[in-house]
Amino acid sequence: MKKIAYTWTIILVAVQLSFAGGPWTKTKGKYYIKLSQWWTIFDQHYTDTGLIDPNVTTGVFNTSIFLEYGITNRLTGVVNAPFLSRNYMNNIRSGTTGELIIPGAAVNGLGDIDLILKYGLSTSSVPVSVSIGFGIPTGITAGGSQENLQTGDGEFNQFIQFDAGTGFQISPKVPAYISAYTGLNNRTNGFSDEFRYGLEFGVGLLNQKLWLNTKLTSVESFKNGDTAETATSTSIFANNTEFLSIGLEANYYVTERLGVSIGTATAIRGEIIAAAPSYSIGVFYDFK
């Protein structure tokens, strides 16, 4: 029963791709810290051919600490630590008799931690940065009675990412910015490597107290790993995942440094990924 074929993943990858926040590095000694809750609940998924199939209702919740710290004016350290991750699935019952086939289950634990170093290559009007990141497999890879629930994928990955962007004025009181990135993710333990790219646009309103942004994020698999039956989990972290996602986020500064955020993202195209939106809320402190 362990190979019950829950071979999809969550848009958690899309969250990971947005960590570094464009090409801008933090000034030495300055930092940004955020406590956030991210979740998705889904009862259908994209198959490996891009079609949508139903599945038992499944949910994933991550409570995370995110930190950016200026080591130097050009070098920024980034940590994303999901210190509490919950993955659950509902009961599986017969569609004809209603008989319980597999009872629901849940697993709680630490998620996979990401460590990133971002270096500013250029400080011109169009800054460029390079980021090197490491995904530490600190999550649970087999939980629940069927061992098909996880909080991590069990593989140590390394990625490199290049960001470029610029700020500009829409009007004298309305600043805006646009940034883009591209990168490669090297995955281990039989998982396929990935090509990543994305675009972000943001605008500041209400004397820059309210910042709204939209993000386009994509992951394309090289499909050079082992097959799904031998190299992917039976839970939420899958091999050969691909998607194109769009996300929206609002950040409001309650004071000069303290603020709250709310966001959502969903895949508009995918393979082996949840066909449902994800949501996030958070509180942050921006020591500019």
Image: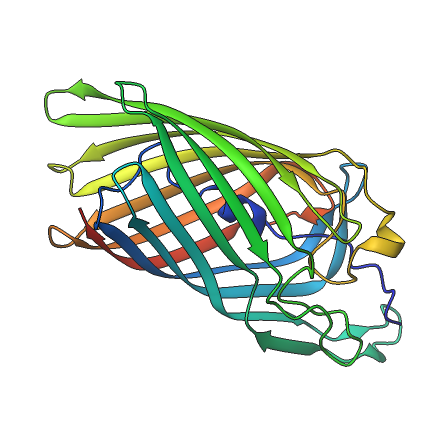
Residue 263 pos. (x, y %) = 39, 48
Q: Is residue 22 visible?
A: no
- For the point 62% across and 52% down, which residue is it? 10
Residue 171 pos. (x, y %) = 15, 19
- Identify the image quadrant of the N terminus: bottom right
Q: For this view, does 209 lie left or right of residue 81?
A: left
Residue 201 pos. (x, y %) = 36, 28
Tell me if residue 164 comes above or below residue 245 in the rendering: above
Q: For this view, does 281 lie left or right of residue 227?
A: left
Q: For this view, does 164 lie left or right of residue 114?
A: left
Q: Is residue 241 visible?
A: yes
Tell me which colouring the rendered structure shows: rainbow
- For the point 57% across and 71% down, which residue is it? 86
- For the point 82% across and 54% down, which residue is it? 231
Kindly give the residue lying farthest to the front in the view shown. Answer: 72
Residue 27, by quadrant, is top left
Residue 41, by quadrant, is bottom right
Residue 121 pos. (x, y %) = 37, 26
Q: For this view, does 60 lie left or right of residue 89?
A: left
- For the point 63% across and 39% down, which residue is it? 185
How many numbered marks does the figure carry?
Answer: 0
